[in-house]
Amino acid sequence: MKVPCFRALITVTVLGVCHSVHALWPMPRNLETGTTLVKLAPTFDIHVQGISQVPQDLLDAISRTKTRLGSDKLQRLVVGRGSVDKGSLAHAPSLSKLVLSVTGSKTVQSIMHEATKDIASRSEGYSLSLPSTNGGTATITANSSLGLFRGLTTFEQLFYDDGTGVTYAYQAPVTIKNDSPAYPWRGFMLDTARNFFAVSDIKRTLDAMRMVKMSQFHWHVVDSQSFPLTIPGFPELTQKGAYSADEIYSSADIQVIVTYAGTRGIDVLVEIDTPGHTAVISTSHPEHIACAQASPWESFANEPPAGQLRLASAATANFTASIIKNIAHTLPSTMFSTGGDELNVNCYTQDAQTQADLKASGKTLEQALDAFTQTTHGTLKAIGKTPVVWEEMALEHQVTLSNETIVMVWISSQNAAAVTAKGLRLVHGPSDFFYLDCGAGEWIGNDSAGNSWCDPFKSWQKAYTFDPLASLSAAEIPLVLGGQQLLWTEQSSPQNLDSIAWPRAAASAEIFWTGSKLPDGTAINVVNALPRLHDLRFRMVQRGINAIALQPQWCALRDGSCNLDS
Amino acid sequence: MLPQALVALSLFLSAVQPASALWPQPRQITTDQTALKLSPGFDIKLTGIHNAPKDLTDAVSRTSSFLRKDKLEALVVDRGASSAKVVKAAKSLKALRVSLTGDSKTVKSISEEATLPLESRSESYTLTIPADGSDATLQANSTLGLFRGLTTFEQIWYELDGNTYTLQAPFDIVDSPAYPYRGLMLDTARNFFPVEDIKRTLDAMSWAKINTFHWHVVDSQSFPLQIPGFMELSQTAAYNSRAVYSPADVKDVVSYAAARGIDVIAEIDTPGHTAAIAKSHPEHIACPEASPWTQFANEPPAGQLRLANEQTTKFTSSLLTSAASLFKSHYFGTGGDEINLNCYAKDEQTQAELTAQNKTIDSALDAFTQASHKALKAVGKTPVVWEGKQTSLKNPHKYSSTSTEMLLVHPVTLDPETLVLVWISADNVKSVVDKGFKVIHAANDYFYLDCGGGGWVGQNVLGNSWCDPFKTWQKAYSFDPLANLTPDQHHLVQGGQHLLWTEQSSPSNLDSTVWPRAATSAEVFWSGPGGDVGAALPRLHDLAYRYKQRGVRAISLQPEWCALRPGKCDLNA
């Protein structure tokens, strides 16, 4: 059965847009599709085969997939929407079931267990088959529960509603062989310190991340402005440093978040930024903070309020290590971030105690920073955690970092090569491609004509054109773990979280899953991406995520008609 | 030096006291430092108003409800906790007495007052709140003025331990707007917005005393407005059968707005921006969906009314008058922006008609416009147009250098009552005013809410929005409505508005794109220009936090740390 698509009627031979499955994001690395409509049988069900004990989080995931197949009710983005397929659907073949099975071992670990493994040893690959025969059985196979879970996510994106409650796929048969990510780290960073986000907002964000197969939630949970993270043994930090008693993540909340994430295939990297970005600690521990709320803040920090841990003080280093240890050991991730960005030297120059500490120990500031970092990283390693740092720690300071340390590149995409040149692994988070907060104007007060420091706005198209391997040698390629878009929240809050992040943040999710090539071998490109990104956006809206419109709906329903040259 | 002493004192106070929350800032206000709280039995009493209009009593009920439900804590570090004793010991205000001055026998409703011609509206009021607990009074010479006063009254109060209080009594406020037109424009054609989104927007507008909703309801992409006698337009060109505004919906929106002091000026943009009409009336549209669109329109799809055709002119006049009959307003927008000459140059029918009538495009546009405006005037409506028709303008060249030379001088004859929206640049205001027209400020370089969100046209990898950068609230706040004008021209400036074109907006980001930014023009045109952004910021935070309490998703302008510490996040602080 031939299904027309809008462009096909006009210029199929020229553009051939119809070959891609519009719904899939990220695009699988291998894909064959047909043109047959297949509807879900009224008795459609999802079964697991050949697994002795099915993990509960996989059963839950299956249950959620079944629910969404019925509740998404997304009509195809074509002129006429679902009604264009209504006639054909009456006689379309039915899909009776989806069967999940694992290759190899019958013993399967939970999704959460697989998702929180070491970043280098996760298995997310799967194969999927959706037949076009009446009464057929679709299959997803993988060698881990996490792979099966990724396959379920793909399966959900294949289905539409015709407007009358019939759920169907329109490009059967679909065959995906060994889809697996190009990079293991596909992340999203959220800052919950500049403004607070409730657990429900974080869960909704994790749901959106899951839809695009993201694997890492980087939680920049505390900063100079507020300290909402409850640390066992240090309740005073939140008592004094949270915005209010209601704006705190309790130990129970933290477990809820890491579990919600883990069961959705997402590892949570928690960051406690040190030694900078710690002014708020002075509200309970003034003895540990240099230049606390010093004025003018421009001389002491990149943004107000100023304040940094007294890195040359042994007591402060031990205090910091204790905080990091007490929280890190409660988290399932094998990684923990100690931050390390934007260290302000003047703050320490003006701090009499730090100067005295340096003098007493005979250390330079850089040596003190090295010792401080060795202390915190030593503590992390002792409890089996891999440290993650911002790029300055690798590129601007004389700090000894162990080989397994992961470095986040943020200042400029140009700096990635310098990190790999040191033999360190990196995660791409460059402000010039991936910062979601740029371009919304100045937030510093009394600056009438100011714009954001990282203007302009980073469009999804800009993010999508990022090349993870630019200026790297072949030998350095394995050091690239992946990348992520980031939301610093000086101008964000629950009110605009969804609209600022989605669907834009899905751009990096595709780059780092699909890699540089589409299944047909052509290079990934924004023209192919746009209709699929529209589809993702409309599906997100159906699921209660306030993703923004990328174009007038007129354009969303007419693939290609609003291109520059159309 | 007394003035300096006062400045020093107020600087000191600003660090420890909540900034007065009022937005827009009243034009005359004195306050002091006495705590006052609302009595548990606090009541708003209409006194001496016979047969009080229902929309006034409804407004009073809403104010009472906000006073109970806002529960906004003061934006200070301890959220007011250190004032607990003072608040507990404070005198209680038992009543706000609301009355009309002058002849109260012929009381008009808020809705009637709000939809009068701009020059006939009275929005002024006087509000007095004594510090000793004796009754507060609100007086105005219109119900609309009383409504503005109620809005001010709501903004005075904070919540602490179940008390609704202020630390700044007494209040003496004498207030009226600097300009009669303070608007917000929403485009519901690029993407559709359900009535509930529009109502929420109207509520938010009314809280900042915005009085005009400029509804750019249809455009080339979709035609959601159901117009009696022209139902085929929405049937064929709405995005779907649910994405329409029925006459009942329009009535609902118009009356909801009017009861909140807001006039709804609908716009049907002509002769450009009308591709959607080709779905049901191909005979009236030149270059419908012509390709490449960059040669025929500023954005896809292309399509313009055949302005030289007599039938099309009649159709348009009839369409406009029928649409205008749905709205109470004295005003109706006929658009007129971005006319693409190449579209007409390539349209054989238009060329044949011009030849037959021996007209140029300009003289045909003049005749077309005179016909539609005459029809509107016949039904009592004053036309509102975009600037292009009577000023000599440069091509804004949104996307392509191959775009035609649009907007040359179009010497269209317009009635001097016509309101002209200046959008291409604030620099064009002078030339409009020089011609003697009344002007509404809508400059994209200050007031376009959609700028800076990246390019939306497909395949344009590194494109940014045509009107980059993002227009910050600070930028809008610095707008000078009288720049380059002579004193004898000042009276032609009716006011101004923020605008949201919705190529990249939908209900998902409506609130967050608009609020609190759009409140800045509300203050510029109510309080007058020249406000200081440093002084405005704490009040704008306050407004945004109150909006959030009321369910409008206003964004955070800064980290909460800054919002609780006025001035601490300023440059050089």
Image (cartoon, rainbow, N blue to C red):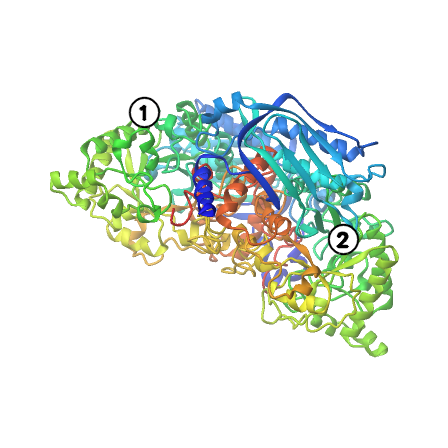
Q: Secondary structure at mark 1?
A: loop
Q: Nearer the viewer, mark 2 or mark 1?
A: 2
Work out how far the residue at label 2 is from the one at label 1, CA to CA, in angstroms.
64 Å
Front-lying residue, B199 or B458: B199
Task: Kindly tell me whether residue A156 is visible in this rendering.
Answer: no
- The residue at which mark 2 appears reads as B119
Q: Residues within 10 Å of mark 2 (few under 14, many from 20)?
A: few
Q: Residues within 10 Å of mark 1 (few under 14, many from 20)?
A: some
Spot occupied by residue B214 in the image (x, y as percentages of width and height): 71, 51
Output the chain of dot 1.
A
Q: Is A316 placed left or right of A146 in the picture?
A: left
Spot occupied by residue A291 in the image (x, y as percentages of width and height): 28, 40
Spot occupied by residue A85 in the image (x, y as percentages of width and height): 70, 45
Front-lying residue, B220 or B292: B220
Front-lying residue, A363 or B434: B434
To which quarter of the image does residue A214 belong?
Answer: top left
Q: Is B485 placed left or right of A506 in the picture?
A: right
- The residue at which mark 1 appears reads as A234
What's the amino acid at mark 2? Glu
Q: Is A18 placed left or right of B9 in the picture?
A: right
Q: Secondary structure at mark 2?
A: helix
To which quarter of the image does residue A357 belong?
Answer: top left
Say yes or no: labels 2 and 1 on the same chain: no
Spot occupied by residue B572 in the image (x, y as percentages of width and height): 38, 49
What's the amino acid at mark 1? Phe
Q: Is A245 placed left or right of B289 in the picture?
A: left
